[in-house]
Amino acid sequence: MAATKVPKPNPGRPRTGARVAAVQALFQTEQSGDAIEAVLDQFVRHRLGTAPGQQGFEDGRVEEADVPLFTRIMRGAATHTEDLDQVISAHLATGWAMTRLDPVLRAILRAAGGEMRDMGGPPARVVIKEYMDIAHGFFGGEEPRFCNGVLDAMARALRAEEFNGG
């Protein structure tokens, strides 16, 4: 599985921007080994919003991002990484380990899981749709379909009440 391009949220969609930034930041956290709070600070100070002379996504910036949502997703994913990884792993094919997943795909699944754990957030189906849009922005192959299956299973595990009619 190979990532292709950085998805660009539509103008006027700061919640989508927050989700894209969270995927990027979770990827960076995993790759660099930096503490979540250091990456959060770096993104809030240098990568979210517009800055003079910056070209937006081409320079790694997310021009429109809901910073409180970005922070909640990041902290939710970081606080519950082990639990989220267990939920994700439970829905992988036998013999597949989390480490075998593309790191961007792992970041997408963890960000979505972090958001789904927030019971005050949007409905699980909204979360799935948003992260599917992000997956399609990063991947052009079978990864989005795989992501959809895992996200649906995660939603049913983390928010069963939304799917059981109560």
Image: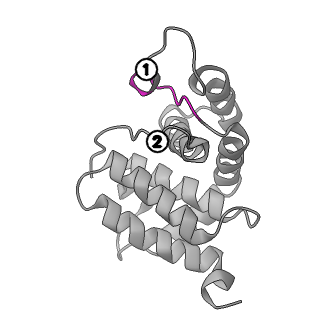
Which residue shows up at 39% across the image and 53% down it? Answer: 135
| Occupied quadrant, residue 110 | bottom right
- The answer to whether residue 90 of the structure is visible from this angle is no
Magenta stretch, main secondary structure, is loop
Label 2 vs label 1, nearer the camera: 2
Asked whether 28 or 161 is in front, the reply is 161
Judge the density around disc 1: few (<14), some (14-19), many (≥20) Cα neighbours within 10 Å: few
Which secondary structure, mark 2? Answer: loop
In percent of width and height, residue 79 lies at 71, 52
Q: Earlier in the sequence, mark 2 or mark 1?
A: 2
Q: Amino acid under label 1?
A: Asp
- Give the quarter of the image for residue 43: top right
The residue shown at (54%, 28%) is 63
Q: Is residue 136 left or right of residue 71?
A: left
Q: Mark number for residue 9?
A: 2
3 or 127: which is nearer to us? 127
- Residue at image coords 36%, 77%: 94
Give the magenta-colored segment's residue range.
Answer: 57-64
The answer to whether residue 31 is visible is: yes
Callout 1: helix, strand or loop? Answer: helix
Q: CA distance from mark 2 to mark 1?
A: 15 Å
Q: Quadrant of the C terminus?
A: bottom right
Q: Residue at x 67, y 28 (%)?
A: 38
Instruction: Judge left or right: residue 142 versus residue 118.
Output: left
Identify the residue position indicated by label 1 in the image. Answer: 59
